[in-house]
Image (cartoon, grey):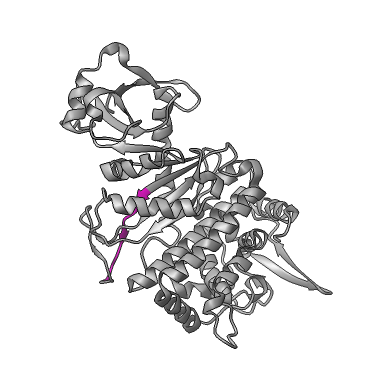
Amino acid sequence: MKKRSGSYPRVRIEGGGRTVVSQAGGVLLVETVRKAGLDTAISAALTPWRKARAVHDPGKILLDVALAVALGGDCLADVAMLRAEPAVFGPIASDPTVSRLIDTLAAAGEKALRAVSTARAEVRQGVWRLAGRQAPDAGGTVTVDVDGVLVIAHSDKEDAAPTWKRSYGHHPLMGFVDHGPGGTGEPVAALLRAGNAGSNTATDHITATQLALAQLPKKYRRGRRTLIRTDSAGGTHDFVAWLARRGRWLSYSVGMTVTEQVHQHVLQVPASAWTPAVETGGEIREGAWVAELTGAVLNGWPKGMRLIVRKERPHPGAQLRLTDADGMRLTCFATNTSGRPIAELELRHRLRARAEDRIRAARATGLRNLPLHRTAQDRIWLEIVQIALDLLAWMPMLALTGKARLWEPRRLRLRLFSAAGQLVTTGRRRILRLAGHWPWTSHITAAIERLALLPNPG
């Protein structure tokens, strides 16, 4: 009998390779940084924190950490993967230098955070202009989803506390621009909070919304061209009132808790007032209906607020709540949008579920935990995470097509960024040759060509 040699071929391993480049697909992010002008913007923003005769630029250091996070890193030390490839990523600061910069920016507090966020906002406007029809504002409006994220802490850190899910850590509140069904999304707000921060904290929702609006071009801060969308955590009197006072500038779609008062009004809605719910594309959703509540249920809420309720048959095995009616699951939301069918408004609100995809991508991109000990440091880390997520949204928007534009960070890393290459020097040119047999090499080269066709910043 033939002796088995195993399921996989044996190869001899040597560590002497000199022209091999790991994470060669990361050039996609580098080219995105260059075409967006993010490197010059961040460097200019952090000029006040550059010490005399410093070798490394603070903006480049911060951006290097963000690139490492975008490639899969989850701590400052993971910038070492870039340091190993200077031909692709340039000179990289040492770990002590990176740590000192984070401490310096943390000590500067709000001033440093505002500098970085202002630079991001300026670059975002330019990226959307480059993206054209692929930009999230191509339809003339922008949708921002505000949602909380639980970040588990595995050690005692400043402001870590028991959470409402009986875990331990932090409870940041984030905002994401929804790119719609043809794209992903990008972060526009990150408010670091203690783990025991309440879900229905109106002050935090107002602050997160203000941060999000500051990231958008000025033209989207008026004329109801921006929609603020939240789950029921945003359904508080103070937050809705704050949104309503800006009704000339903002539209809102805020989830509401089904209270006993709402429940009683639902029971009084006549059968003729219920409209079939719809799905994307306009087809009717079987077993689901929507109706608008009026009258005393709106007492105490801002003028112009509409309350729309949805009832649907629960899935087999689903447990009903006390506030559900006649065996139907009830949900409701408030909006100030008029002149559109309530079924269309309900579908628009339900698409808020895409925010869960953005949260999953954030957890896979540096938000699985907060690696630093002090809150001031972790606030800088949140800015780094947002830069990484920006790049992971901008690169597909500018360079990828078809289904590849929908790939989440883990798939981008597995198929594109992890591709290996060979660095060849001919004359004065350096050429990075990707493996011809790699199934997604054509995606990388085509994306690089699209980025090359974009105008250079400035």
Q: Give percent across and percent down for residue 431.
A: 75, 67
Q: Give percent across and percent down for residue 370.
A: 36, 66
Q: Which residue does the image show at 57% across and 62% down from the upper left?
A: 9
Please give left or right for residue 450 compared with residue 145 in the image.
right
Q: Which residue does the image show at 28% across and 31% down from the upper left?
A: 331
Q: Which residue does the image show at 41% across and 28% down from the upper left?
A: 345
Residue reaching furthest to the top:
272
Snapshot quadrant of residue 231: top left
Asked if residue 218 can be seen in this view, the reply is yes
Q: Which residues are magenta?
A: 147-155
Residue reaching furthest to the bottom:
53
Looking at the picture, does residue 16 appear above or below residue 70? below
Asked if residue 371 can be seen in this view, the reply is no
Q: Give percent across and percent down for residue 305.
A: 34, 32
Instruction: Say which of 454 and 91 sits in front.
Output: 454
Q: Give percent across and percent down for residue 155.
A: 27, 71
Is residue 288 shown in magenta? no
